[in-house]
Image (cartoon, helix red, strand yellow):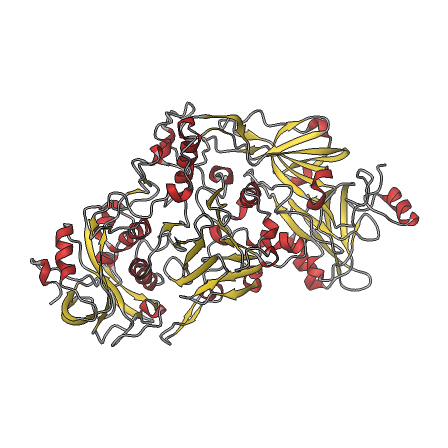
């Protein structure tokens, strides 16, 4: 028998030797270890039996460090027993408090947590990954973090070590310059205990699972993406992350049948990226690499991994994947020389099964994921709250507080708007996410700056993508020159679920359009910090920058992300010495045009725009003719969407910009609009879509009775009959026509205008007569 993991009395040591009671109660390398919960993999269906002393016990077959055991609970209430039985399933990696014998689980202070489910394999052959130091780990016990857990594909094995990772292998930068050593970003090699316990786990029939040995663990043949058969395993360690340098693997569960990958190439840049256009053809499928659409992240998280990077020196970082962004802000709280009050603010939490990437990305930038003090969520969809619970567990395990922020509207629903209207709109956060809902303690106050010293954040309520979607501005002090730069983060960019008007999405379609116009009209933003890296090329910009800086010819003229990111669209027209289109406004225009214009209906037949299908603002079903309206700002010219984003001739790979091909949109750089904040004196429209409002949809060919919801009434500002709107003209064919319209508008002036059913300002034959 190995030396004990931690100090016990002689009686306890004798019992340990006699029974090998708990998973981590015996074994190790001889130094003291704190007591911990036991852990094992469920391989049988749990059963409930009546206890002689009253109540019920739950018994479950588990593969543990001490062999194949049936673990039984102390008597609990029948209700708790039923809940525990429902909680446990074959393939679950679980932990429990060791009982008096090796076959018992002691009652937890909360009986419902007698077993904690750490990971769930189920019957799927899909990939699961977990880094040893971060993410999933055995639960905290008696004031100490639990032992580490890891998961992944087995890529190497010696008598004393095992190598596990996600198969990622990056051999060259995007300019084709090879790395001295291929990058295996999410791969780790571990020491293995001499008496490691090994199990062959049959996911097709868990009852056939059996004890095995270390020599029998298969190793994935190679790193070729065409090698689809890959050996998956869970690993348990004898120590927690605080002693990771001394940790050894004490239990391994390897799975049969083997996992199956998608057999497609993996890149750091998003799938279908223009940076793949010169990479040639895939020898396996024969397709051009640029045309291969990667498998979805739910089944294949490894397809979305990307290198993290710094955006503003020592302050703002990208730590997400190549589809969903996540950012870290280091805030000095106004006391740069005192680190004790610093905040580490993480924006959004990404996909549930991609946590291993986010934690490692942070580590690669010198940021401990357990140092995060605040987690801000933009909206209640799973690709943005996915790792919240995992992060909370990680923090709980070390006894640290994590403050969770969110919009009340997506957490508990919309009960009222800022105009005093009452609503009963359900939140986007699913009812099943009880822990996120219970532990969200800070709800956003909109349209005001949160001050954190060298970092400021403003949250803007912009429903549409979800009822409670938010956008954010980050003002970040650049330590190089002491100046603040502003990043715009659109927090609800997806059009999914709103492609056609329905009873439930009508108000969100109108609110979504308004949100884009409002942001374009009200905000001045230096750079885009996209929520989705496959809709704005933030990852391609970094990869292009990296390739530029690795070119020996550029050794003495290195650039930063602030050099690589464009503030203004490179080819946008210049009026009065200023480019009229910012990259942020252009990114907003892409999505605004999708919901607004008939032209995008033609680009994607599954979509029906507000122009063709509504809903129309109440009372405007036939448009408005000669209505009075007061202009509330200086108005501005908006250019149609310019498809090649972040064109930057300084960097060869960005010289032509980055058009995204993920979804259909209208590339319209020669279209122009005049957009204005305006108080339309229309007594029928109140700034919202009323509950139960019925309207005919021309595009759908039927009438729809809509659920009500706020549109402009999401803001507190008041107008004559309803909150001010942000409206624009119909499309103008030239910049000159747009300038003619703009020349007639004076802030504070009252004019006569006409509106289409879609509330677009009608432009007569002489554009100068638009505002009369």
Q: Is residue 604 left or right of residue 406?
A: left
- The count of marks equals 0
- Does the image show residue 698? no
The correct choice, above or below, for 224 with respect to 377 in the image is above
- Image coords of residue 159 (percent x, y): 72, 26
- Which residue extends farthest left? 765
Residue at x 33% of width, y 41% of height: 660
Q: Quadrant of residue 363?
A: top right
Q: Quadrant of residue 250?
A: top right
- Image coords of residue 229 (percent x, y): 55, 29
Q: Nearer the viewer, residue 244 or 142?
A: 244
Q: Is residue 515 left or right of residue 470?
A: left
Q: Nearer the viewer, residue 223 or 67?
A: 223
- Does the image show residue 756? yes
Q: Point out the image quarter for the C terminus.
A: bottom left
- Image coords of residue 297 (percent x, y): 48, 42
Residue at x 75% of width, y 60% of height: 56
The correct choice, above or below, for 680 with respect to 369 in the image is below
Residue at x 45% of width, y 36% of height: 268
Q: Point out the image quarter for the N terminus.
A: top right
- Which residue extends farthest right? 10
- Image coords of residue 60 (percent x, y): 72, 49
């Amino acid at each position: 028998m190995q030396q004990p993991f931690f100090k016990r009395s002689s009686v306890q040591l004798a019992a340990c030797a006699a029974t090998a009671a708990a998973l981590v109660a015996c074994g190790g390398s001889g130094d003291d270890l704190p007591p911990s919960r036991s852990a094992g993999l469920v391989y049988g269906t749990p059963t409930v039996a009546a206890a002689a002393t009253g109540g019920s016990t739950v018994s479950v077959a588990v593969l543990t460090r001490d062999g194949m055991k049936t673990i039984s609970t102390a008597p609990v209430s029948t209700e708790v027993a039923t809940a525990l039985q429902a909680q446990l399933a074959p393939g679950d990696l679980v932990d429990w408090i060791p009982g008096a014998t090796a076959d018992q689980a002691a009652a937890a202070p909360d009986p419902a947590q007698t077993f904690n489910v750490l990971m769930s394999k189920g019957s799927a052959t899909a990939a699961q990954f977990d880094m040893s130091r971060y993410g999933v780990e055995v639960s905290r016990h008696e004031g100490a973090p639990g032992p580490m857990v890891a998961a992944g594909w087995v890529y190497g094995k010696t008598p004393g070590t095992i190598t596990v990772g996600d198969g990622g292998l990056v051999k060259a930068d995007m300019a084709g310059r090879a790395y001295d050593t291929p990058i295996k970003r999410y791969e780790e090699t571990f020491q293995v205990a001499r008496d490691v316990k090994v199990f062959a786990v049959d996911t097709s029939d868990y009852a056939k699972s059996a004890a095995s040995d270390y020599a029998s663990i298969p190793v994935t043949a190679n790193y070729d993406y065409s090698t689809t058969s890959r050996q998956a395993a869970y690993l348990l360690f004898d120590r927690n992350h605080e002693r990771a340098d001394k940790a050894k693997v004490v239990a391994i569960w390897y799975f049969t049948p083997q996992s199956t990958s998608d057999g497609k190439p993996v890149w750091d840049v998003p799938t279908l990226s223009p940076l793949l256009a010169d990479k040639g053809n895939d020898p396996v499928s024969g397709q051009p690499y640029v045309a291969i659409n990667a498998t979805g992240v739910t089944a294949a998280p490894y397809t979305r991994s990307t290198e993290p990077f710094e955006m503003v020196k020592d302050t703002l970082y990208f730590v997400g994947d190549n589809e969903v962004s996540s950012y870290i802000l280091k805030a000095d709280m106004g006391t740069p020389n005192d680190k004790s009050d610093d905040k580490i603010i993480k924006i959004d939490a990404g996909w549930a099964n991609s946590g291993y990437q986010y934690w490692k990305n942070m580590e690669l930038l010198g940021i401990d994921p357990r140092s995060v003090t605040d987690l801000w969520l933009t909206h209640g969809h799973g690709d943005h709250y996915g790792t919240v619970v995992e992060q909370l567990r990680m923090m709980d395990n070390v006894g640290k507080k994590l403050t969770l922020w969110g919009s009340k509207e997506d957490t508990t629903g919309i009960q009222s708007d800022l105009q005093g209207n009452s609503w009963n709109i359900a939140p986007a956060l699913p009812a099943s996410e009880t822990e996120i809902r219970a532990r969200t303690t800070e709800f956003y106050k909109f349209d005001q700056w949160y001050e954190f010293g060298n970092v400021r954040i403003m949250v803007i309520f912009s429903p549409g993508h979800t009822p409670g979607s938010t956008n954010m501005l980050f003002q970040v002090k650049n330590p190089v020159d002491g100046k603040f730069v502003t990043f715009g983060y659109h927090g609800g960019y997806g059009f999914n679920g709103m492609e056609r008007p329905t009873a439930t999405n009508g108000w969100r379609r109108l609110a979504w359009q308004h949100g884009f116009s409002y942001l374009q009209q009200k905000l001045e933003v230096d750079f885009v910090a996209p929520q989705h890296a496959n809709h704005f090329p933030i990852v391609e910009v970094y990869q292009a920058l990296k390739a530029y800086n690795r070119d020996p010819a550029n050794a003495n003229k290195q650039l930063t992300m602030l050099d690589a990111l464009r503030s203004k669209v490179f080819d946008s027209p210049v009026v009065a010495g200023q480019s009229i289109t910012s990259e942020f406004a252009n990114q907003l225009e892409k999505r605004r045009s999708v919901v607004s214009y008939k032209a995008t209906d033609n680009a994607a037949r599954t979509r029906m725009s507000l122009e063709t299908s509504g809903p129309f603002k109440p009372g405007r079903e036939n448009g408005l003719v000669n209505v009075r309206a007061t202009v509330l700002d200086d108005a501005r010219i908006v250019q149609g969407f310019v498809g090649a984003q972040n064109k930057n001739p300084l960097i060869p790979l960005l010289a032509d910009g980055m058009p995204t091909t993920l979804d259909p949109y209208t590339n319209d750089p020669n279209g122009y609009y005049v957009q204005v904040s305006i108080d339309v004196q229309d007594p029928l429209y109140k700034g919202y879509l009323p509950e139960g409002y019925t309207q005919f949809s021309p595009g759908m060919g039927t009438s729809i009775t809509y659920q009500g919801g706020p549109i402009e009434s999401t803001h507190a500002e008041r107008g004559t009959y309803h909150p001010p709107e942000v409206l624009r003209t119909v499309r103008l064919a030239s910049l000159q026509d747009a300038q003619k319209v703009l020349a007639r508008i004076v802030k504070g002036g009252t004019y006569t205008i006409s509106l289409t059913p879609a509330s677009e300002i009608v432009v007569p034959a002489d554009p100068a007569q638009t505002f009369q």
